[in-house]
Amino acid sequence: MTIKDTSSDVSTSQESIRRLSRRQYLRASLLAGVSAIAGCNRATSNIQPHAPGNVSESVPTKYWHDWPTIDAGTPPLEYTARVGAPLDPVTVEYSSEDDPWMREHALLFERALDSLGVPSKLIDRPLNQLYAQSWDTAGLENVISMSSQGPDPQRGLDPNPFLMRLHKANPSNYTNYWHPTINELLDTQRQLTGEPKRREKLVGRIQRLFAADVGDIITLFPNVITAANTEKWNGYVPTPGNGYTGDAFQWTEVNLQPKTDDTAYVKGVTTSMNSLNLPWAAGGDEELRLKFIYDSLFDASPNLDIIPALGTDAEVTGDETVEVKLREGVTWHDGTPFTAEDVKFSTEFYIEENSTSQATFYKPIESVDVLSSHRVRFNLKWPDASFTTQRLVRSAIIPKHRWEAIDSPAQHNPTEPIGTGPFKFVRWNQGTRFELERNDEHWMFDDDWRATALGEHATRGRGIERIIWINVGNVDAILGALTQGQLDAVGSTLSNAQADRVAASDAIEKLSTESFAPVAVKLMHSCPLIRDKEFRIALSMAVDNRSFIEDVLRSEATLPEGENYISELVSPWYTPETHHYRHDPTEARRILERAGYLWGDDDTLHFPNEDGWAAFLERIRNGNTHKRREELRQPDFSKRAQTTEGQS
């Protein structure tokens, strides 16, 4: 076989592609990629399926392990590997509601699969359906599922919000991924409460193993792009993952200073709230907005440092005990003093009543002891290294005197929610409007406190009086209202084109910040095709995420080092020495060919045949799914095919 040198052709083609629009880029890049590699692989016609010996001729998607979190007979995905047969379409699910460019991102994978000869089917799902799989431990409903990861503050403070999903016993392991060594390392590192350096080394090893294994495909860390009126307001604070105007942090809202007599800050959003019940919130935007009313025990600064909130100091006093000193002089919005009894009640109430939004906080807690009016001790079920980071930051403390008489808290909808947070409840019109007013007594409105917490971004002055969220319905309507002065900021993310368009107005500015939340392309590991590490590596090498970032996102994103869930913003947990399978679709096809895969006359990829099929079955067997073909001492089937052709 002669391999044509097409590097100059590809370079010229890519240069012309860079001058095209996003959608034109994807279509042109698809044609360029396919034409550059067409003919490199042996087109096999008249494939006669044959399984050698007593080997099974097909393998369905099934549970390959006993999963302690799964109570189901079969996974929700139906996909079967058959000896010598062409691959059925690989289903790729995404939500165009997730990010403005998510459909183009799905087309990026359609292009990558097509370059390998793999048919695909794109499925655009409502965002709430896509994220509902996070609670459906039976597994993904499609072979590939992609989504942005939320900017919850604790995800930038500790590696476990992402890494513990890889654990076999984690309810959020909805890819059915299992790596025995990673499981052991996860169990060890999460218990190292007093050994941060040792824990860092273990987290680094986990990342290196996962990246080399291509457990998922992490394509990019997208910048958070928004737009806001900078003519009326001063003091916007860039926060990683949240942007300047998101709801995961309140730094902008407590720091803004009006330049006019208008002191009501109005944000346009596209999603509404369903209730005012924070502990049993549906998650997402509803939970984040309600947290403006409540405080956590600790908070995350714009630099992703852990800083005091209701708790001023946390001390690990034993392997399974943590004592927290509480802030004094704090009152609930109705004037009732805040005490340690509120912390004990909130925590044990969440445990007893199975609070949905607070599970991350209370999961390792056995009980809470009140040591004094402003000091508590948390007694844990097991040592938990992330308790003083992600879990305490994830907490939301509610008033005992308002909740202790509630019989059915999951169905409760407070008419006037009371917290200790920086803003007080004013009104809520379901589906249209949510309004809060400032809590003058809150420490975040102290100029000196903000100067310490926000550094160069801190402002001085009285600040805003009210925040109002208006559900406009769609982004175009928000942008129109923003340019007309009816809104002050966009509360959701924008594409480059949207932000540039609205920033043409003198009063409006495009605002962009980096993010610690990746776009994760999750692979369903119960699927026999995905279980083959050779295929996973080939798929990773077929995805041109660098060009996507440069040409579609116009460099408004960070390229990860391999399949690395942890951003370089998340210090000290970031691991730069992870294996990176460079973009090389030609080599990706060679990997598949050496592993025994075949191509039909129409360039459709077929599962291996004959001895290649037996080798495929060996690779997807339990214990082998993390090993390369060479580690299993399997032959190079491309050489076998060439020998056979030569003899014929």
Image (cartoon, grey):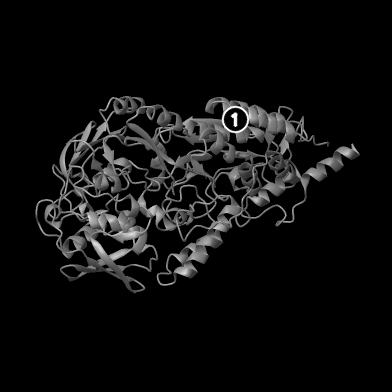
- Please state if 506 lies on the left or on the right of 586 as rendered: left
Q: How many marks?
A: 1
* 207 relative to 595, above or below: below
Would you say 396 lies left or right of 520 here? left
- Give the farthest residue toward the right: 647
Measured from the top left, where is residue 177 in percent x and y?
52, 51
Query: Crowding at label 1, few (<14), some or many (≥20) Cα neighbours within 10 Å?
Result: some
Q: Nearer the viewer, residue 232 or 555?
A: 232
Q: Amino acid at mark 1?
A: Arg
Query: Image height check: is 168 above or below 87?
Result: below
Q: Secondary structure beneath disc 1? A: loop
The percent position of residue 216, horizontal first and vertical second, equals 54, 47
Q: x, y (%) of residue 627? A: 65, 55
- Return the x and y of residue 458 as percentages of the image width and height: 29, 51
Q: Quadrant of residue 452?
A: bottom left
Outermost residue toward the bottom?
318
- Which image quadrant is residue 297 in? bottom left
Q: Which residue is mark 1?
A: 18
Question: Which residue is depicted at the point 44% across and 68% down?
Answer: 196
Looking at the rendering, in which quadrant would you find the C terminus?
A: top right
Q: Is residue 472 visible?
A: yes
Tell me the quadrant of the picture where the N terminus can be found: top right
Q: Nearer the viewer, residue 279 or 443?
A: 443
- In-image side of 21 versus 455 (left or right): right
Q: Residue furthest left?
A: 335
Residue, x 90% and y 39% (percent of image)? 647
Note whether residue 90 is visible.
Answer: no
Relative to 448, 613 lies left or right: right
